[in-house]
Amino acid sequence: MIGSRIAAVGHYQPARVLTNEDLAGMVDTSDEWITSRVGIRTRHIAGPEEPVDELAAHAAAKALAAAGRTPADIDLVLVATSTAIDRSPNMAARVAARLGIPGPAAMDVNVVCAGFTHALATADHAVRAGSARRALVIGADKMSEVADWTDRTTCVLLGDGAGAAVVEATETPEEPGIGPVLWGSVPEMGHAVRIEGTPPRFAQEGQSVYRWATTKLPSIARQACEKAGFAPEDLAAVVLHQANLRIIEPLALKIGAVNAVVARDVTESGNTSAASIPLAFSKLVERGEVSSGDPVLLFGFGGNLSYAGQVVRCP
């Protein structure tokens, strides 16, 4: 195998929309307070009858349809999530069962907000090694289930959703592909973003995360571009983890992607953790803001103070 490529993407969000005005009736906050600090206007919230694997399966089905593939074509399922309540069966196995995928390797990847780009790299490596021919890579999280709805500093951030990509082998080096991943973490600062306790609740040290993301990550993202053989100004789009508009905009500026479309899906979706990158990427593709073959930087960061980024060619 020469390499791998993203053949198609898809996304899904629950129907219920929670506005800033709705939140102002729940906690001491306001639309002005939220938009000025994080840039979020709305977020989608799943109901109790919508588990994480259902969100994931909807997004995956759309990606499969867009790729012109059937469940029988998939031999590896990877689900990036940090909101799986049950330990077993894992989300990947549940998604495979929902879609009727026969006998795949099925694994969950928990790297929180950087989960999708870690899972995408894992699929790329599996395909390059010949361990898989075609993979389904999904980021899905139900952050509303781990939100502390009494904490105005965190509950305003979170939303639910899923995004997916079909990754398949390429036969020639000229085909659009997935660039090498640059990944790592700062484990001694893992306490800065947490989902802990019984029941589990999301918490973070916002200022620590902001400083780390805006000062340490630009050079790492540029290195990911270099590994793929691109200068930042060559990028057609930049899709960062959709954490906070006040992080996304300065980080994109410091990367130097001056000609790129910058995904700002956080404004309407909130922070959907592992779902945020494939969700935002799929929307760019759906709206025609990027064209087939365009180089796009995907860069996840957050929980565990982990990061992973790669340049991919748009399907």
Image (tube, grey):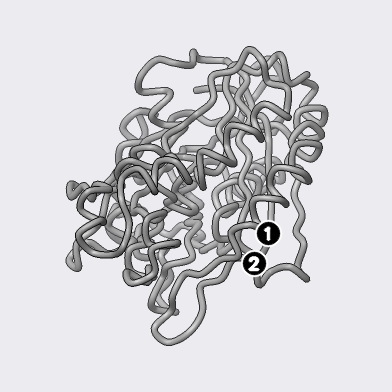
User: Mark 2 sits on what residue?
Assistant: 192
Residue 269 or residue 274, whichever sits in front: 269
The circle on residue 208 is 1
* In this picture, residue 119 sits left or right of residue 130: left
Residue 85, above or below 76: below
Q: Residues within 10 Å of mark 2 (few under 14, many from 20)?
A: some
The residue under the point 60% across, 47% down is 123
Local secondary structure at mark 2: helix
Tell me what residue is drawn at x 33 percent, y 72 percent.
Answer: 150
Dot 1 falls on a residue whose secondary structure is: helix
Classify 305 as above or below 20.
below
Bin the neighbour count of mark 1 within 10 Å (Cα to Cα): few under 14, some 14-19, many 20 and up.
few
Query: Who is closer to the viewer here, 72 or 117?
Result: 117
Establish if 273 lies above or below 311: below
Residue situated in front as seen by the camera: 44 or 151? 151
Which numbered mark, 2 or 1, is in the foreground of this view?
A: 1
Q: Quadrant of the N terminus?
A: top right
Q: Amino acid at mark 2?
A: Ala
Numbered circle sitting on residue 17: none
The residue sitting at 51% across, 79% down in the picture is: 196
Q: Quadrant of residue 92?
A: bottom left
Amino acid type, mark 1: Ser
Left/right placement of residue 264 relative to residue 187 reads left
Number of numbered tags placed on the structure image: 2
Q: Residue at x 30, y 50 (%)?
A: 30
Q: Is residue 143 shown left or right of residue 124?
A: left
Frontmost residue, 118 versus 132: 118
Q: Residue 170 in the image: state x and y as whole percent.
A: 62, 27
- N-terminal label among 2 and 1: 2
Image location of residue 308, percent across then percent down: 68, 47
